[in-house]
Image: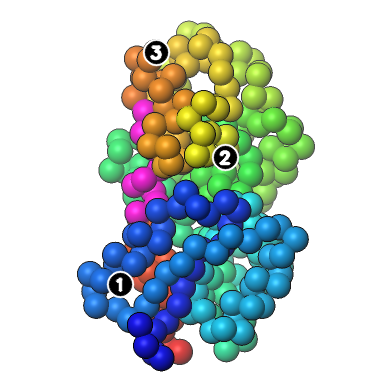
Amino acid sequence: MDGKTRVYGLIGDPVEHSLSPLIHNSIAEMFKENFVYVPLPVKKENLGEAIKGAYAFHFGGMNVTVPHKQAVMEYLCDIDEVAAQIGAVNTLLWTKDGYKGFNTDIIGLEKSFISDGFDVTGEEIIMLGAGGASRAVGILLARKNAKCIYILNRTLETAENLKADILKFYPDARIEVLGLDEYGRIPGFYQKKFNVIQATSVGLSDATKAPIYDDDFYEHVNFGYDLIYNPLETLFMKKVREKGGKAVNGIHMLLSQAVASYEIWREGAVNE
């Protein structure tokens, strides 16, 4: 490190579990880049001050994780079109006017779906959760022409808002909203098997928790995709596998979105 070292980081709460520092610092070492990436725990009430401070210190860019992916948008000078469509930001780039926001989650998702063999197009998909992470998932499912997207969430109002946001850009998408315990209302649920995306933070750093505990639900999961990567096997994944389904975690998504963030920062550094 020296006076020319560029600083990047990850803001969220919690961030202690994140593999992002390992990934980005490994990228820096691999490509002989003079930058360092650090985890930055930030509470909700301190988000605005944290963004101002990072900008004042000329942090070249940052990743944003839960619970700040939506709230951070009000502190940015510009937002990329795709991120605006998703309504959530996970990557910030320093510019002379402030930070510009991007969303590389959707890039990571699409690449990981392909590499993991998670079928979307023409399929009925169950998505658990309607928070910041699920917004990129919902937009991608609509873009990839899922036959129907069933959003199961604890708070129906939040899920309805997400549905409305997706329909603004993809009016032909078929989306149904249900509570987490209402999966049995999905037409033909007990006669089918579904591909399921676990997009809540339940189970993050705690392998004893899952958004749904009922074995009855997991009997009808063909393929479970959990966006969480720590622990490597969540209770959601374990239950899917115990009932004969395939399950993967979000490590491929993490790696793919990290590379996309790195490319944004590198181009920004060159053009600065």
Please state, as top left, top right, bottom left or bottom right, where the N terminus lies in the image. Answer: bottom left
* Residue type beneath disc 1: Ala
Element at label 3: loop
Q: Where in the figure is residue 2, as x and y percent of width and height?
A: 37, 88
Judge the density around disc 1: few (<14), some (14-19), many (≥20) Cα neighbours within 10 Å.
Answer: some
The residue shown at (42%, 42%) is 229
Does the image show residue 95?
Answer: no
Q: Where in the figure is residue 265, as x and y percent of width and height?
A: 42, 75
Number of marks present in the image shown: 3
What residue sits right under mark 3 in the picture? 243
- The region drawn magenta spans 247-255
Task: Give above or below for 271 relative to 9.
Answer: below
Examine the image and state in which quarter residue 184 appears. top right
Marks 2, 3: nearer the viewer: 2
Q: Would you say the residues marked 3 and 1 are in contact, meaning their CB atoms lie under 8 Å apart?
A: no
Which of the two labelled residues, at mark 2 and mark 1, occupies the earlier sequence position?
A: 1
The residue shown at (49%, 74%) is 61
Element at label 2: loop
Task: Give above or below for 213 relative to 106.
Answer: above
Examine the image and state in which quarter residue 26 appears. bottom left
* Residue type beneath disc 3: Lys
* Residue type beneath disc 2: Ser
Q: Where in the figure is residue 171, as x and y percent of width and height?
A: 62, 45
Which of the two labelled residues, at mark 3 and mark 1, occupies the earlier sequence position?
A: 1
Q: Where in the figure is residue 112, as x and y percent of width and height?
A: 35, 45
What residue sits right under mark 1 in the picture? 28
Q: Whole-Å distance between the Cαs marked 2 and 1?
A: 29 Å
